[in-house]
Image (cartoon, rainbow, N blue to C red):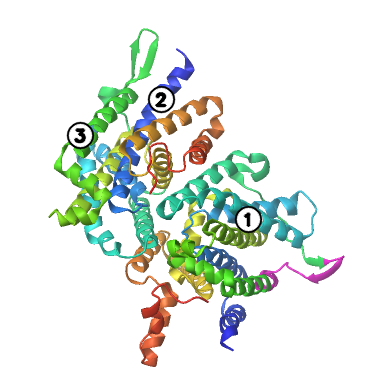
Amino acid sequence: MNIYLLQVINGVGIGMLYFLLAVGLSIVFGLLRFVNFAHGAFYLLGAYFCYQMTRWGMSFWLALVVVPLAVGGIGWATEKLILRHVYATDHEFHILVTVGLALVVQELVILQWGPLGDSVAVPDALQGVVIWGNFVYPKYRLFVIGLTAVLAVLLWWVLEGTRLGSAVRAGSESTEMVSLLGINVLRIFSLVFGLGAATAALAGVLASPIRGAEPFMGVEALAVAFVVVVVGGMGSFSGALLGGLMIGIVQSVMSTLWPEGARLMIYVAMAAVLLLRPHGLLGRKE
Amino acid sequence: MKKYAYFLLAALVVLAMPLTMQSGSLASEVLIFALAAMGCNLLLGFTGLLSFGQGIFFALGSYTAALMLTRWPVPMPLALLLATAMGALGAAVVGWVAIRQRGTYFVMLTLAFSQMFYFIAYTATGLTGGDNGLMDIPRPNLSVLGVELWALASPWQLYGFIAAIFLLVFWLLLKVSRSTFGRTLLAVRDNEERAAAIGYNLKLLKLQAFVISGAVTGLAGALHAMMTGLAPLSNAEYHTSEMILVMTVIGGTGNLLASLLGSAFYLLLADWLSQLWPRWLLLLGLALMAVSLWMQRGLWGLGDSILQKLQGRRAPAATVDAKGEQA
């Protein structure tokens, strides 16, 4: 099979994970107007919680449901207990408080699971490859593409088709107006922050059988999520999807052409997009 | 007298460190990172730009100094100057792209660029040594036209040299912050729209602040490479940018002397706690959260308000300008 076609499909898989990672960051920014530097920490927690559950002999499928709920709950509580108290201050302090939080989470993870990473087993049902004619591809990676596609549709429906979604979209335009209409904006803030944490954790769970779990994956994921939202456009759902796919495919194809420089190329791609479209592919001027 | 108060206080700290501290390397490190934190402070405290890219300039400075001292036989002072220039150049490039964006976008861009630089340094093994970094960097004595002026072999001799450079840069930055340029930066920090409406060229001002900050940080990186004899890849990591930023914020923004305080606090605490508990960064994360939540003017602001309370008068600085007075 053509190696480039294979790498493009790989790239779609990575890109969908990047989308899942970045979409929460983007929505949280759209509504709360602040960049959550602890977003990578939720991804990290997702991967490690999944690792721990499978080590305890529980099924991966259970982890796939339980871990996002648990981390989403942590995110929800974080917003209520900590972040709410800095909204009135300058945006530097929004960032710094989450930088501090990310550091705390990372050190707690090292304290609990040690500084070295470990691998997470691919669930039994998804071991091996699928073979269609001369198309041979790992089952787990196909599953990731399928599941993230379903989740993308689901998230899109939540944002476009539910009351919560309308409140979020309206809140992104004007928080004040929404609260004047009698909607409890603070409740929406916690919910959306929890949702963002849950999607990041889900990305962590799905990524863990591919790349394992290690304590510094949070920082790396944060930087990638930034690239995706900067490329796609901040606060835009479809921007996160487009940016995620583009970055995933660039990284994957480049890993065949120039393995040492593949990670560098995603940042080069970002710089190129920014020079042409300063607000990202689908972003609006603020 | 008040005009020189900050400079005299800085000189006092520089003189007090050899009397109170055991390790000359640790004292040197305090001054080196105080330089880096002052560079960061010029952006955050004076211009309102939160930069996660300070590690780029620090690493650029250390790589440049390392290359100059190992591969090309340039005199040591020239190597330091070139490292400073490389820091400024790096900041001009990063700044040129990043300051097109404002607020949170700007912050994210600086972090993305710092990751980009990390992968460049990782890939360009011919220049940077890649994962291994550059090693065995010599520390030549300071000499002019063959006349030896200053031996740098022992840690405390090096401390003296770094202290002289530190005080010079501190003096220069104090001058900059009190100049019309420095005052204009404060206007940009406090209200960008107003400053633009008055007719200031925001992009140019921000770029200038960026270049100065990059130069100072590059110099700090070069001194660090000279002190340790190493220019490791870890200088280009996210962690370095984060550390410089944390020192700046914990010390207090908007005041240059506070950056010295922040650097000393961070490094002395790190030196002490890391022997007791390897996961001391956890406490640092908590400290950063506490500062963001309750102590936004940092240690300097805390000391300031305690002093005001002791003197029994209302704190005028705190009511007029919550972000702290300028040095």
The quadrant of the image that shows the N terminus of chain A is top left
Q: Which of the two discs, 2 and 3, sits closer to the camera?
A: 3
Residue at label 1? B87
Q: CA distance from mark 1 to mark 3?
A: 48 Å
* Nearer to me, B203 or A108: B203
Residue B306 seen in render = yes
Q: Chain of mark 1?
A: B
Placement of A54 over or under B33, stated as above or below: above
Taking depth in this image into account, of A166 and B70 the one nearest to the observer is A166
Tell me if residue A114 comes above or below residue B201 in the rendering: above
**Vertical comparison of B72 with A205: above or below:** below
Residue A135, how many percent across, how many down? 38, 12
Residue A238, numbered label? none
Magenta stretch encompasses residue B98: no
Residue A10 tag number: 2
Check if residue B155 falls in the magenta segment: yes
Within 10 Å of the Cα at label 1, are there few (<14), some (14-19), or many (20+) other Cα atoms? many
Q: Secondary structure at mark 2?
A: helix
Query: Dot 2, crowdedness within 10 Å: few (<14), some or many (≥20)?
Result: many
Report the span colored magenta: B144-163
Asked if residue A68 lies left or right of residue A93, the reply is left
* A181 on left or right of B70: left
Q: Residue at x 44, y 54 (%)?
A: B102
- Residue for point 80% across, 53% down: B73
User: Picture quarter containing residue A205?
Assistant: top left
Q: Is residue A174 left or right of residue B259?
A: left
Q: Residue at x 49, y 26 (%)?
A: A253
Residue linked to disc 3: A157
